[in-house]
Image (tube, rainbow, N blue to C red):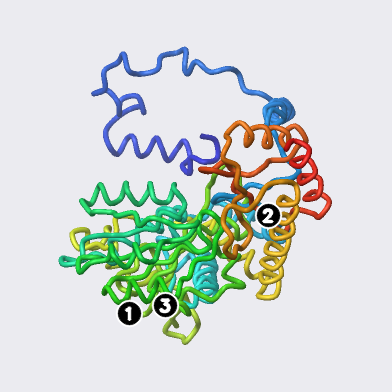
Amino acid sequence: MGSYVPTTAAQREEMLATVGVKSLEELYRSIPQEMLLKDGGLNIPEGLSELEVRERVSAMAEKNRVYKTVLRGAGAYRHFIPAVVKSVTSREELVTCYTPYQAEISQGVLQGTFEFQTMICELTGMDVSNASHYDGATAAAETIPMCRDRKRTKAYVSAAANPQVIEVMQTYCFASNTELIVVPAKDGRTDLDALRAALGEDAACFYLQQPNYFGQLEDASAVGEIVHAAGAKFVMGVNPIACALLPTPREVGADIAVGDGQPLGLDTAFGGPYLGFMATTAAMTRKLPGRIVGQTTDVDGKTGYVLTLSAREQHIRREKASSNICSNQALCAFTAGVYMAAMGEAGMKQCARLCVSKAHYFAAALEKAGCPLKYKGEFFHEFVTEEADPGHRKKVLDALDAAGILGGAEVDGGILWCVTELASKAQLDRAAAIVKEVL
């Protein structure tokens, strides 16, 4: 263990003598001897030098396919990350940070988390945010027990939400014996008539994704009115970059706002680690799962930070807990906080505007190339082009792949494209030209 063992040899000898044994081996004398390692030790290769390790790992990394142009999202998005973000978060004081159990010696980590919560509230318009979840899907699923009670036992989700989010919600509901009903979509958006007909007196909540999985912008205000008319809670899953331009969840009547914080300074990184954020109104504060960092003052009047309202959690009051998830993604949340601080309001809005303008430019270019839009509604930075033949879809994506371009994701009846601020006009023109040539 090297320097990771905090005791000296003399201290270990003293401890062994205190418990009445002569060696470390004697501590394990009750364990069957055939289970213990003998003189041969672990059957692992000899150690390598730093240079040898670097060369071997580099050789492994060269097997990865790195695309210069990425036109795929579907839940994970490539955005520009300012250099200051990784410069700050890679500091050794922060890179190992986890949940600050000893708050009195974790003031820096707690303040960083508090700032993250504050900015999430500013993005969503909500009153209070927690210190994060594992990812956006688990955050979405955690809203169901927040809203469920003895009379309202059914949860609802739009079919236009990300299928992976729906799957996680189904897993949670199966485990808690909660019925989850998927409300159908129509023309790429939630079917409002179907929603109105589905919600009954036992409806606990409805989850709407904005923008939805197909990139379409939903009529969130109308959805909120329908949900509240049924006496249920309105939950919105949002893209944090889109929040910089769109009306906040609070402004359209949402009771809870959740989402994946990956676009906020986190690399796509083969799917993780990401973080889920959750914010809600003051009325639902005590039902908010996960950790919350609060600001206070000490006996000398100095500002300090604490973990607050912990009684909601399983480690304090297990039988009455609103959630059995009490872990958070401290480093990822801190990264998101640094990103938002570095970008500022103007930078976030500029990023969102670039996403919108470039996505619409590319959509128009694809239509000219022979790929009509499947859905005609407004969209943010994702959209679906219509192509019913799987063979044609494969030819298009294979041709782009051969040119070093990661094309969109295949969906039922088409291709789901995504454009962020990282795609240049030249890259988009080249991709459209390749698609036109294939078609």
> Amino acid type of disc 3?
Gly
- How crowded pointer 3 is (Cα within 10 Å; few <14, some 14-19, many 20+) is rated as many
Q: In the figure, 340 relative to 86: above or below?
A: below
Return the disc, 2 or 3, that comes first in the chain's sequence: 3
Sequence-first tag of 1 and 3: 3
10 Å crowding of disc 1: few (<14), some (14-19), many (20+): few
Which secondary structure lies at badge 2?
Answer: loop
The residue tagged 2 is: 419
Marks 1 and 3 sit apart, C-alpha to C-alpha, by: 13 Å
Give the amino acid at mark 1.
Answer: Ala
Q: Position of residue 148 (x, y in %)?
A: 24, 64
Q: Residue at x 47, y 65 (%)?
A: 105
Looking at the rendered structure, the secondary structure element under dot 1 is: helix
| Residue located 55% across and 49% down the image | 74
- The label on residue 253 is 3
Say which residue label 1 marks: 283
Question: What amino acid type is highlighted by mark number 2?
Answer: Val
